[in-house]
Amino acid sequence: MSHLDHTPSTPGKFKMDKSPYSYSRARCPSSLAKLIFWSLLFIGLIFLFFYRPPSSSTNPLRSDRSRRSLQISWGGSAWEKRVRASASSRSRNGFSVLVTGAAGFVGTHVSAALKRRGDGVLGLDNFNDYYDPSLKRARQGLLERAGVYIVEGDINDVSLLKKLFEVVKFTHVMHLAAQAGVRYAMENPNSYVHSNIAGLVTLLEVCKDANPQPAIVWASSSSVYGLNTKVPFSEQDRTDQPASLYAASKKAGEEIAHTYNHIYGLSLTGLRFFTVYGPWGRPDMAYFFFTRDILKGKTISIFEAASHGTVARDFTYIDDIVKGCLASLDTAQKSTGSGGKKKGPAQLRVFNLGNTSPVPVTDLVGILERLLKVKAKKNMMKLPRNGDVQFTHANISLAQRELGYKPTTDLQTGLRKFVQWYLSHYHAGGKKADA
Ligand SMILES: O=C(O)[C@H]1O[C@H](OP(=O)(O)OP(=O)(O)OC[C@H]2O[C@@H](n3ccc(=O)[nH]c3=O)[C@H](O)[C@@H]2O)[C@H](O)[C@@H](O)[C@@H]1O
């Protein structure tokens, strides 16, 4: 029996050719036809083996562009010299901080602030294209002028991380690299697993082996409070009902932090950021794309809860968040392990960094309209079931007590600074660039 006799005959999927001609050709092939047939089959199998169809929904790094950016080489004495220079502090007891996600919104501001006060800062960023990478490049330019070098690479790259720890004895890691955004988690769930879970574990593995082990401060999120209804949200509240995979990945991060603290003596501080906004912000966030769309005359969708219920956020200005990050680094105790072994109990903390003053999204739009002097075209719509929660509100008393954290910027003031930046960045001299 020829192998062709086993061909499935599913109707519509594969049509059998029942002609006597093809039947006899299949049963009695000439040796040349046989050779051609087997060669084609062989080539086909090789092609199937090596070819992987591109898929943006399963590929965590999203595109060729982002993958290409990771192929940039590192290493060599000139590179090591640059890494060392960027990471060395001005004073003898200054910090040497590895900032992951340094080309991101919070990463750029924190890196610049650390450098300004004399600490050594080395950035790490994969420059992926979750949002316009040219904004990340512009932030990189800012940091370069301030003396901060950003190494281009991914937190999942173990050999790169090991190399960095070989070249520099980092005292601290400010871990801000993450897949951000609540709603995008339904589009590309794997990117959250790749960055927020696998990436965190890879980084902590390298940190626990480092000698000395650094103290780690990292970005968790207000979204871990999920569907909680008791306000304001306090660190003691339950965090076991996340509303998005993003929130679940940050909650997982908090549990992973507990494990590394418990087993290896790593000092870990998680910061639950509450909707951080400001100049050099993220274009995927509502205040940013509302500004862009209002200026373009495009309709914006404003979410409301059932029965026209208010949707509100505890919007927190970037400068307040930076102060909270620096205070966390300053109060972080040393890790206690060495050579991958715990030597004693180490510090494990979680803080809310919010503004304690929730503002309805409709009010945010009103402020933007006044600042931009343009009336928004609004479409009120029901809060979609895509991971958004109805409100957030931080209790910050723990951060106040332990970090001296005290936010001072209200939404009106913060948005004025954002709009000033936005107009100068995208519309300076009448030039209209796309955000
Ligand atoms: O605080 C946090 O933990 C999170 O804050 C933001 O998430 P979110 O608060 O949802 O911020 P936006 O996406 O800017 O949304 C702000 C508000 O605008 C609303 N919105 C959003 C989009 C839209 O088209 N219309 C609209 O009314 C949202 O429901 C939300 O109430 C960030 O995107 C997350 O990465 C971060 O971790």
Image: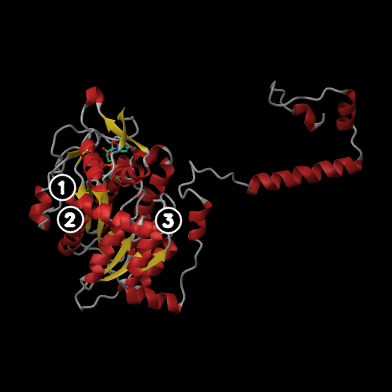
- Tell me: 265 left or right of 26: left
> Which residue is denoted by mark 2 in the rendering?
320
x then y, percent, for residue 411: 18, 47
Determine whether the residue tagged by mark 3 lies in a helix, strand or loop: helix
- Is residue 410 visible from the viewing direction of this image? yes
> Which residue is denoted by mark 1 in the rendering?
355
x then y, percent, for residue 204: 32, 57
Q: Amino acid at mark 1?
A: Asn
Q: Are marks 2 and 1 in contact (CB under 8 Å)?
A: yes
Q: Residue at x 89, y 23 (%)?
A: 20
Q: Is mark 3 within 8 Å of ligand 1?
A: no
In three-dimensional space, the C-alpha distance between marks 2 and 1, rounded to whole angstroms, equals 8 Å
Quarter-of-image position of residue 168: bottom left
125 relative to 249, above or below: below
Q: Amino acid at mark 2?
A: Asp
Q: Amino acid at mark 3?
A: Pro
x then y, percent, for residue 182: 33, 41
- Tell me: 158 left or right of 273: right
382 relative to 110, above or below: above
Q: Are marks 3 and 2 in contact (CB under 8 Å)?
A: no
Q: Earlier in the sequence, mark 2 or mark 1?
A: 2
Q: Earlier in the sequence, mark 3 or mark 2?
A: 3
> Which residue is denoted by mark 3 in the rendering?
133
In three-dimensional space, the C-alpha distance between marks 3 and 1, rounded to whole angstroms, equals 29 Å
Q: Earlier in the sequence, mark 3 or mark 1?
A: 3
